[in-house]
Amino acid sequence: MPSPYASLLVFLSSAAVLVLELLAARLLIPYVGNTIETYTAIIGIVLAGIALGTWLGGRAADRTAPRRLLAPLLVAGGALAAMTVPIVDVLAVGLRGTGAATTVILSTLAFLAPAAVLSAVTPVVIKLQLDSLDHTGSVVGRLSALSTLGGIAGSFLTGFVLVALFPTRATIRAVAVLLVVGGILVAIGLARSGSERALGRLGADGSTPLLGIAPIVVALLGVGASLTTNGPCEEESAYFCLAVRDDPQSTTGQVLWLDTLPHSHVDPTDPTVLAFTYTAWYGDVIGAVAPDGAPLRALHIGAGGLTMPRYLRSEHPGSTQLVLELDPLVIDIAQRRLAFAPGDDITIVTGDARRTVTRLAAAPDPDAAFDLVIGDAFGGIAVPWHLTTREFTADLRALMAPDGVYLLNIIDHGPRDLLRAELATIADVFAHVAVLERADERGGNHVVIASDAPLPLDAVLARNRGRARDDVIVSGTALEALIGDARVLTDDRAPVDQLLTPRPPTPRPGAG
């Protein structure tokens, strides 16, 4: 095989492995959640596949003519890549949200084999290129470097281009088809080189053909199988799998789902409806802070269905609001499918909230200080770690009025180590901190309330009781006891996913 063709094969097969690795997260997260465990499992399993494929591919190349292996490896790799879609979509439904083990199992079943088969291409090509021991080092070094460069190219192409432009499943199917076509072209090229007679015929020595019909049929069946499932996404962005579903308990309510979680409940006919428990707690606090319906200047970290901006627009007319949302498609769906009406009173900035807050905090405007900050951003079942730290909290404080109030929704269960750490962090920045939670359950949603001014906790509980609720507020010495020895979260140490204790089935921000 000419050196340029060999180099191209190694480069492209390695790129395909990394494309599949990055897209694996896109397939799995809607079922198992967006956590560090998800990425850890995927990376570990794909690396295992690369190691296994490199080892077995080298052994096979020593025992079989390497020319006969290349085309079948590419075709098989394409077939297995296509099968990742139905494997995940079919099996993940029954395993949804059952913990880190689910991710490891699904990653193994779906991605170990294609990663191994495609990684076997490199040692096979190396064996094919070794015509002299005098050049072993340069050949192995060059092709190994090209394999790494292919992986880098596949990573950049996927993360910066493909995810933003194309649906995940369509991209995987396209990669699968390209691998199958590439295998066929390799078989044809090798057959025409003179070492074999023709595609599908026996070689001059009576050995097996380079590529028979059966592998191609299997590959096409794999691609066809991938077309039989669609996954849980109604719409897909660079960040989330999104769906809008009717609320079964309301004739007019709708729920916005991001990946595995219902993130927002919206009643387009009545913006005062706060159906999720934690949003109703927001309403209790807001009503206590501004009981006369006075306008507020509010900052929202996370938009969802824009439930709270609608509520403030209705209950506190004249309020000015800044909404920070990572995903532009979330805003688009809120307008297009959840009847959100844009206006001059609500400014929406898309992009990472940490960057925007840091930029604003670098030159805060005292005349535009926020009376209210609502933290409701979630990546999976946890607040993104960089939005939990002391540094971020201090930046928020710099943007707030002296009597401004910070509300943060935290989900935690069991020993509630994440909640305790976040309370310790916020108490390290604000003078007054409390947490509003259910009286009869230690786990679920908790709304942290913080300010440099004394908190109107009695008024909050009065409004809560007015809704026939018996929730509790933990503050003072009881809060100190709850925090205990929890460490403050910082930009240098914020193990949010490790501190979080989930509850199976996966807890929901709205239902907690």
Image: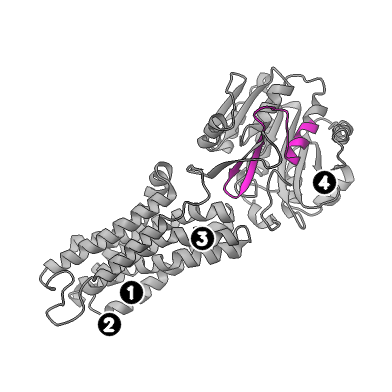
Q: Mark 2 or 4 closer to N-term?
A: 2
Residue sitting at x 86%, y 34%: 457
Between disc 4 and disc 1, whose residue precedes?
A: 1
Mark 2 Cα-neighbour bin, 10 Å: few <14, some 14–19, many ≥20: few
Give the residue number, with chain letter if any, for mark 4.
438
**Circle 3 residue:** 90
Tell me the tag on residue 83. none
405 vs 41, nearest the viewer: 41
Task: Give the amino acid at mark 4.
Answer: Arg
Report, in whole angstroms, how far the alpha carbon at label 4 lies from the one at label 3.
37 Å
**Is residue 276 in the magenta section?**
yes
The boundaries of the magenta stretch are 256-285
- On the question of residue 137 being in view, the answer is no
SS at badge 1? helix
The residue depicted at 66 percent of the width and 39 percent of the height is 376
Q: Quadrant of residue 432?
A: top right
